[in-house]
Image (cartoon, helix red, strand yellow):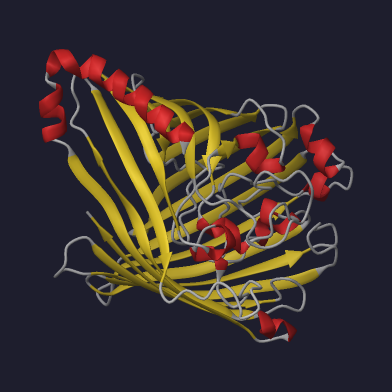
Amino acid sequence: MKKILALSAILAVGSTQVFAANDLESAFKESKIMGQFRAFYIDRDYNTAFSKNDRSAFAIGGKFGFETAAVNGLKFGIMAYTTNAINPNRTNGNGTPNLHMDPSLFGKDRKGVTYIGQLYLNYSYKNTNVKIGRQEINTPMAGMDDARMLPNLFEGIVITNKDLPKTTLIGAHFWNMAYGTFANAYSACSYLGIQSGYGCGGYSSLNQGLAKYDTGNFMNMGKQAIGKSNAGVTVLAAIYEGIPNLKLQAWDYYAWDMMNILYLQGDYTLNLSNIKTTVSAQYINETNVGDNVKKVFGKEVGANLFGAKINFNIPTSVVQNFNLYAAYSTTGSDTDKVLNGGLITPWGGTPGFVQGTVTRLGYVADTTAWKVGTSFDIIKGLNLHLAYSYFNVGSKAKYALTTHDASETNWDLTWKCRLIKNLEVRARGIYTWNFVPGQNFTEYRLIANYNF
């Protein structure tokens, strides 16, 4: 909290100096209140020997803050994040943790939590934007992963420039991040967790157990990832759309004394017999930097993933926004590398084309995966998405160390209410098979978001 107050003071002083000559009072008078109210219910039932771990939870919260009007291109923003249990029962009668209370909606130890998640200065001049401080970001290999109550958040500087025609250039450096509530679905520093978007949460040894992450606590990027502090993560990216119907993007993440991640993606759209068709390809490469990873895992980083996807947007008189898609991905394997050549994805970045709502096995080593799905509007404002994902996990997959197949079937029903502007209600059903060998479960979610 002391760090938050210190940063607030620095930003406030900086804001006063810049705004003073151009009417600080009007900047705050014209501020906009913004945020999101969220209610989230989740229920998971195991239908195998894991049935003793059935769990559910209901939480309310969201994010609430304001942003000043821009004066001479400069504005200030602050946002608080909170999650709180409805009818909490965190412990059993003997004081032990209630394992039937789903941890993924709450903070550490299944507790409610409130914290300052965004605190930033944003400066715009012509085609350049600079944002510094705590903020939300969404990039391929580092992002919010807003899958439960509260998202991941980052502390750093992001510079975006659009001087070149049809080109966006991005330079960024992040020194800290705070995990959101979804981290608590995993065991800290587990093989599965570190390949599913979440790292060690400050620990420097493996398998620290479920719900060990300190939700909302901004920690060093390297310490969050593998329990070893570093100089942060430097990001360079270019997004080019100068060729008709083609979008190309390249991202490079240099995690000091840890690893370098290269992410490439291309999307080409064409018309086939009046059907809008988009063909996409992606490639992820991870290489070792320094010796921090080897100190924790005993081996250096080395991983690759290739993915492809095709989407058909089909005009029809029966339903609107009708899409059909199919995707494929494959990872390499190398027993001389950490996780046997599986990807490390510790900062919420999980951009794979083949990914279930829960199942993220497409990032583990020696795995071939595919997915098919469809989405369409049942009526205006009511969209249904159906998907099936299948994973052929090889024997080199470190989290299981046994060859097995796994799958996920899911449906997602989203309603955007026309009577209450900015209200969205979503219902989800997820059915997994062999997620971990021998483990099957059914999960249902009901989510309401009201943006303002």
Identify which residue is drawn at 44% across, 32% down. Answer: 239
Viewer-closest of 243 and 66: 66
Q: How far across and how far down the image is residue 385, in percent?
A: 41, 71
Viewer-closest of 41 and 263: 41
Question: Quick one: which residue is furthest to the front in this view?
Answer: 94
- Rendered position, 78 above or below 93: above
Viewer-closest of 92 and 336: 92
* Residue 264 lies in quadrant: top right
Q: How far across and how far down the image is residue 99, in percent?
A: 63, 75
Left or right: 382 as drawn, with respect to 224: left
Identify which residue is drawn at 61% across, 81% down. Answer: 93
Identify which residue is drawn at 66% across, 35% down. Answer: 222
- Rendered position, 168 above or below 141: above
**Residue 16 visible in the shown view:** yes
* Residue 141 lies in quadrant: top right
**Residue 161 visible in the shown view:** no
Identify which residue is drawn at 71% across, 42% down. Answer: 226
Q: How far across and how far down the image is residue 296, in percent?
A: 81, 41
Q: How far across and how far down the image is residue 88, in percent?
A: 47, 74
Count of labels in the image? 0
